[in-house]
Image (spheres, rainbow, N blue to C red):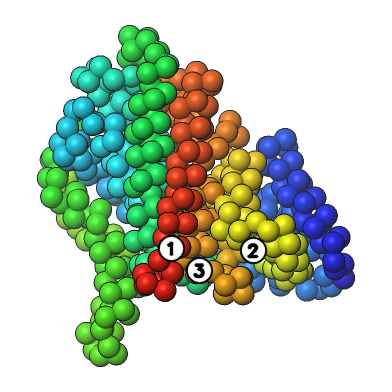
Amino acid sequence: MITGSMLIIIFVLSLAALFFLILKMKLDPFISLIVVAFLTALVIGFPISDIPGIITQGFGDTLVGVGILIGLGVIFGEFLGASGAIEKIAAGIMRIFGVKRSPAGLSITGIAVSIPVFFDAAFVILSGLLKSLAKKTGISIITFVTALGVGLILAHSMIAPTPGPIVVAENTGSDLGLFIIYGIICAIPAALVGGYFYGSFIGKRIHPSLDEIEAQLPEIEAKPKKEISSGLSFFLLGLPIILILLNTVTDLWLGDNSISKFLGFIGDKNIALLISLIVGIIVLKPYIDVPYNKLYTQAMNSAGMIILITGAGGAFGAVIKQSGIGDYLIDTMQGWNIPILLLVFIFSQILRASLGSATVALVTTSSIMGPMAMELGVSPVLLGLAICAGAVGLSLPNDSGFWVVNKFGRLTIPQTIQAWSIGGFIAGLTALAMVYFLSLFTGILPGI
């Protein structure tokens, strides 16, 4: 079995093969990850009889922690979108921020909405706001596109129960409740810097004609058969997060008693989202004018591929871990005097930019680096958040999200890069800065 510096060469070649299969051969990420995992194991020299077991165990171990949660989360998001709750949440936040600061409000809206709803769907749902806000305020639509996109991708990459951050929290051994809290703390300043301030800056320098894009921007879909209230919309959005946080609170402040056990049970991530989904199915029925079986089908189609990619990323990570590549890579890079938080940020950023998938970057990086948090002498939460920050920016044309922003924002490719790709990169750097800020309170803040 190969050891030493050759492991680095094999690791680089395996990543290159992964890029080639996804970007050049246009092979699906799930198939690409599985193929590369098998080839890497063969080249390293694992016994042929052991390789299938390593791959399948890595696949299964990853989904043990997040498989059910991904499925429930996607279905929950479908129900919120179909009921009109997403639009109500957006309108409520806009009222809080007012017209002049509406880009900041839209960015925060993006964070709130993208927690239960995946980036692509959330951007499409909220894209109807772009035209109306630009016309009402006179602010460049570029500013609103940047604010919305950056807010959405920050929650998508940093705040559970979105699948990527859940996998990172699982792989780093972080408490999920604390991971959510600190993820929000890092995401909000990043959204304001990368989404609001940078969006305002770039919006003053790019002035696409609103008349040209007006007819092409999608309108928000027709209202459901009955209009949902803002209070119910916000309640449903926050319900799974509140339940999960209850589990964290009980661990921190309550002893081992029947109350803490009960709260711990309903605060389990799978149970919390299951309860929220059941509540949503029941209370949203008057507001949804779409057959439930259609919503389930749409959700299952989305969840299936996400689950497969997540499991395949775990399988590839298992090969890397058992080969010793991860240990050798860490030892080597530590010799370069790169701080570990910056190291995992760079690693995640490279995967994000190259593969065009924040989820693949999060799963792969955390599978390799996450289990080493204690060995590296760093807080698992901080390590995980640095990985998440690396997956925020540098969305390029190999990313489906790039084309969602381009299409529904009605921008040219250069405009999309200036507004969305660079805005996300600035937001990711800001999030990393917030991670370093939190590190100043090591031993003071819970979990840090």
Q: Secondary structure at mark 2?
A: helix
Above or below, comparing residue 246 to residue 438 in the picture:
below
* Relative image position of residue 335 (x, y in whole percent): 73, 62
Amino acid at dot 2: Ile
Which quadrant holds residue 202?
Answer: top left
Report how far apart the C-alphas of labels 3 and 2 lie in the structure. 13 Å
Amino acid at dot 3: Pro
Which quadrant holds residue 291?
Answer: top left
Q: Earlier in the sequence, mark 1 or mark 2?
A: 2
* Relative image position of residue 429 (x, y in whole percent): 49, 44
Amino acid at dot 1: Leu
* Relative image position of residue 401 (x, y in whole percent): 49, 36
Instruction: Tell me, for residue 368, which label it has, or none.
Output: 2
Name the front one of labels 1 and 2: 1
Determine whether label 1 and label 2 are within 8 Å by CB.
no
Determine whether label 3 and label 2 are within 8 Å by CB.
no
In the image: residue 217, left or right of residue 85:
right
In the image: residue 66, left or right of residue 141:
right
Label 1 sits on residue: 440
